[in-house]
Image: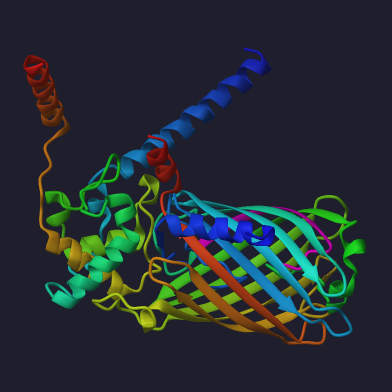
């Protein structure tokens, strides 16, 4: 077997060896809802973003996400990020470690979740998991060799507010990020998402391409400047419809074209993700070694 | 009492308070106590899918997808994950079970399933209720039975 096929084949075998489940999270790429990972489950996800910036090279940013439900009120996630740019190079851009907590133990009309993340990413990162501060299209024209020389260690916090009403999920995120290295001002951003399954009730028989396996969503996100200049000016804004398809007992695939809403934004940013939930991951190891 | 002792005493009091709060949280979620928190409006809710064969079949699929990982495929539970075929669960009203699926019991590891659309939650309840109660022998009875079996095996050997 050629070496380049080895790891994809190993990953496919591992994924197909354990039964998966459909996660109950809405299919947003940037916005978070109050759905946490079920305790003991591990979700493995690959999130990609592809775009061709004006006067720049086409890039494909990717983030491998490992999301673990530590308890019913605490979810922890670890990301590894990298990107490849046409006519340039392929680089590893860093990692993130995030934690989400539900402070209220009951369901309310608006459900808050607190989010804390440590990021160690260089400026070549193109995973675009959020937009903060004065994000600009010019940032995506920096050659990888230059971008990877500058590593930012930052602390990001989010206030996530989310509601479920008659099958609809409505989520709002308020983001703030502070670079821990430098005395840069704190940067702000936002994300808002609305989603709904195409069918609210399940059918009696298993099916593949039926409405219950699809979720439609739309999200809007962008920067809100920083402490020196708060607002919509000189930052990028995006709007994207999303369609997600869950293969019963298998992975969930989501696709979204994101449209830039101003001159600072990329024209179109294509997002694509594949996620797979492994149920009770440590229980499996326990049974395997027994 | 010097300043150091006073500060240590204050810290110990803080730890005791935190431990007390944690114990209270655990007790609040102890088996069955959630039933006390269910509002009357939820208790009165009726399952629009109760007894419908198609809904029960759909509920079974949803149960295997979302619930069986903890409560087992036969819904009998395992370890700290309770059986859903106990008389306690089977005799709870549909509205009470709906309330638990919506809110979860986060302090005890039961997640909220509010992201599942309401009809799907009712379908799961229709399926669980269709299983009917099964009483499992208590741990005391099981260990006594095991002891008798071991003794009989030894005698045969």
Quadrant in the picture for residue A206: bottom left
- Magenta stretch: residue A130 in it? no
Q: Residue at x 87, y 59 (%)?
A: A148
Q: Position of residue B114 (x, y in %)?
A: 38, 66
Give the dominant element type of the magenta stretch: helix, strand or loop.
strand
Residue farthest to the right, as pictured: A146
Which quadrant, please, contains the C terminus of chain A?
A: top left
Residue A202 percent across, percent down from the top left: 30, 76
Name the residue at 76% across, 87% down. A267
Evaluate whether residue B125 shows in this view: yes
Q: Position of residue A208 (x, y in %)?
A: 37, 78
The image shows residue B39, relative to residue B21, as above or below, that is below
A86 on left or right of B94:
right
Can you tell which quarter of the image residue A187 is in? bottom right
- The N terminus of chain A: image quadrant: bottom right
Picture coordinates of residue A223 (x, y %)? 74, 73
Magenta run includes residue A115: yes
- How many numbered marks are there? 0
Answer whether residue A167 is visible to the viewer in this image. Answer: no
* Residue at 26 percent of width and 64 percent of height: B98
Extreme residue in the top direction: B1
Task: Tell me where the magenta segment starts and ends, as one range.
Answer: A112-127
* Nearer to us in this view, B97 or B135: B135
Q: Viewed as shown, does residue B41 lie left or right of A44?
A: left
């Amino acid at each position: 077997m050629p070496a380049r096929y080895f790891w994809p084949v190993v990953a496919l075998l591992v994924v197909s060896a354990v039964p998966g489940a459909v996660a109950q999270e809405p299919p947003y790429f940037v916005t978070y809802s109050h759905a946490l990972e079920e305790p003991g489950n591990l979700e493995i996800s690959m999130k990609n973003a592809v775009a061709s910036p004006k006067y720049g090279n086409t890039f494909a940013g990717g983030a491998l996400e490992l999301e673990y439900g530590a308890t019913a009120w605490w979810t922890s996630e670890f990301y590894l990020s990298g990107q490849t740019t046409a006519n340039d190079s392929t680089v590893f851009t860093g990692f993130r470690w995030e934690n989400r907590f539900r402070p209220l133990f009951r369901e309310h009309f608006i459900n808050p979740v607190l989010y804390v993340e440590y990021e160690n990413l260089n400026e070549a990162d193109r995973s675009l998991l959020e937009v903060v501060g004065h994000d600009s299209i010019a940032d995506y024209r920096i050659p990888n060799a230059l971008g990877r020389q500058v590593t930012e260690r930052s602390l990001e916090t989010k206030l996530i507010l989310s509601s479920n009403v008659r099958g609809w999920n409505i989520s709002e995120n308020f983001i703030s990020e502070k670079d821990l290295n430098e005395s840069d001002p704190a940067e702000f951003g936002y994300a808002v998402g609305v989603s709904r399954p195409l069918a609210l009730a399940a059918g009696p028989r298993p099916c593949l391409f039926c409405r219950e396996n699809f979720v439609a969503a739309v999200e809007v996100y962008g920067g809100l400047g920083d402490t020196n200049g708060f607002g919509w000016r000189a930052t990028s804004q995006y709007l994207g419809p999303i369609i997600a398809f869950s293969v019963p007992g298998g992975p969930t695939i989501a696709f979204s074209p994101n449209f830039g809403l101003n001159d600072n934004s990329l024209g179109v940013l294509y997002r694509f993700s594949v996620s797979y939930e492994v149920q009770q991951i440590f229980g499996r190891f326990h049974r395997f070694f027994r | 009492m010097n300043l150091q002792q006073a500060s240590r005493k204050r810290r110990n009091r803080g730890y005791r308070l935190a431990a007390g709060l944690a114990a209270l949280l655990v007790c609040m979620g102890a088996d069955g106590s959630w039933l006390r928190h269910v509002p009357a409006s939820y208790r009165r809710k009726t399952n629009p899918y109760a007894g419908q064969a198609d809904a029960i079949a759909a509920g079974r699929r949803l149960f295997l997808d979302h619930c069986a990982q903890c409560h087992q495929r036969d819904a009998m539970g395992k370890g700290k994950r309770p059986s859903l075929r106990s008389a306690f669960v089977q005799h709870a009203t549909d509205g009470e079970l709906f309330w638990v699926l919506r809110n979860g019991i986060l302090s005890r590891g039961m997640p909220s399933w509010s992201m599942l659309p309401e009809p799907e939650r009712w379908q799961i309840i229709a399926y669980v209720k269709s299983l009917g109660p099964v009483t499992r022998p208590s741990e005391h009875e099981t260990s006594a039975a095991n002891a008798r079996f071991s003794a009989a095996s030894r005698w045969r050997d």
